[in-house]
């Protein structure tokens, strides 16, 4: 058998006008993700409630990003420290370890998401730039969605809540429009690589 593929390191940093407690309460409510972050989370189901301390909870996910391909995977909560850290171990189509960390910075909350993930498609050197772009797109939609969810939760009346716009939706599952776009991205990356190889070295 060949050596196991190296995990792919992903890191995203958000900054929102909120307290860590506000953001943590949103992130820990995993089964609500398809409602407020539908651009990435299509389905989330609790498989095991875990312990009273939050550790051991198991969740099953169906996710997608900019690309039309859906992924089915699960996560087990390995650390639950309100309101600073939520760590997990993922398995299924996406295997690895990840975490959400929250820090107060004045009137804002700095949210950092890290994921060391291993999957055949994710670790492919050919597809990695495209998959990275897809992941960055999903996380950008996540930041938009989080800000809207904060507004929704802070609304004091039903009228105020109704005025909050819906979150960015998921992309179509029909592959053709996105694959055409993907071809363009790959072509641009390949073209840039050729030009880089041809340019004279500068010292």
Image: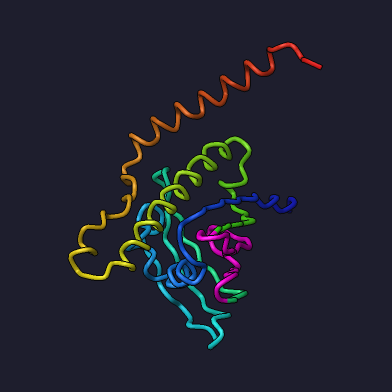
The question of residue 86 being in magenta is answered with: yes
Furthest toward the front, the residue is 106
Placement of 32 over or under 174, stated as above or below = below
Which secondary structure type mostly characterizes the magenta part of the structure? strand
Q: How many marks?
A: 0
Q: Position of residue 95 (x, y in %)?
A: 60, 60
Placement of 84 over or under 64, stated as above or below = below
To which quarter of the image does residue 179 belong?
A: top left
The residue that appears at 43% across and 76% down in the rendered structure is 46
Q: Nearer the viewer, residue 185 or 125?
A: 185
Q: Describe residue 116's horizontal placement relative to residue 59 as left or right.
A: right
To which quarter of the image does residue 146 belong?
A: bottom left
Q: Position of residue 105 (x, y in %)?
A: 57, 59
The residue that appears at 61% across and 62% down in the rendered structure is 98
Q: Nearer the viewer, residue 140 or 88?
A: 140
The residue that appears at 71% across and 53% down in the rendered structure is 4
Furthest toward the bottom, the residue is 52
Furthest toward the right, the residue is 203
The residue that appears at 60% across and 70% down in the rendered structure is 85
Split into 4 quadrants, where in the image is the C terminus? top right
Q: Nearer the viewer, residue 186 or 17?
A: 17
Q: Position of residue 178 (x, y in %)?
A: 37, 36
Name the image colouring. Answer: rainbow
Q: Nearer the viewer, residue 186 or 31?
A: 31
Magenta-colored span = 82-109
Q: Position of residue 2 (x, y in %)?
A: 74, 50
The question of residue 57 being in magenta is answered with: no
């Amino acid at each position: 058998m060949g050596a196991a593929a190296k995990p792919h390191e992903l890191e995203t940093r958000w900054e929102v006008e909120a307290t860590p407690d506000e953001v943590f309460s949103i992130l820990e409510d995993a089964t609500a993700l398809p409602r407020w972050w539908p651009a990435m989370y299509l389905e989330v189901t609790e498989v095991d409630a875990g312990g009273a301390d939050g550790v051991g909870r198991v969740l099953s996910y169906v996710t997608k990003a900019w690309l039309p391909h859906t992924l089915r995977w699960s996560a087990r909560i390995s650390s639950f420290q309100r309101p600073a850290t939520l760590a997990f171990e993922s398995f299924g189509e996406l295997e690895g370890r990840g975490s959400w960390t929250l820090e107060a910075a004045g009137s804002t909350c700095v949210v950092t998401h890290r994921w060391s993930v291993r999957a055949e498609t994710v670790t492919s050197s050919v597809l990695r730039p495209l998959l990275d772009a897809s992941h960055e797109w999903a996380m950008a939609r996540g930041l938009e969605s989080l800000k809207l969810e904060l507004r929704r939760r802070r609304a004091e009346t039903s009228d105020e809540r109704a005025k909050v716009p819906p979150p960015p939706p998921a992309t179509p599952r029909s592959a053709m429009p996105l694959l055409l776009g993907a071809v363009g991205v790959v072509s641009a990356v390949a073209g840039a690589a050729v030009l880089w190889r041809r340019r004279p070295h500068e010292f």
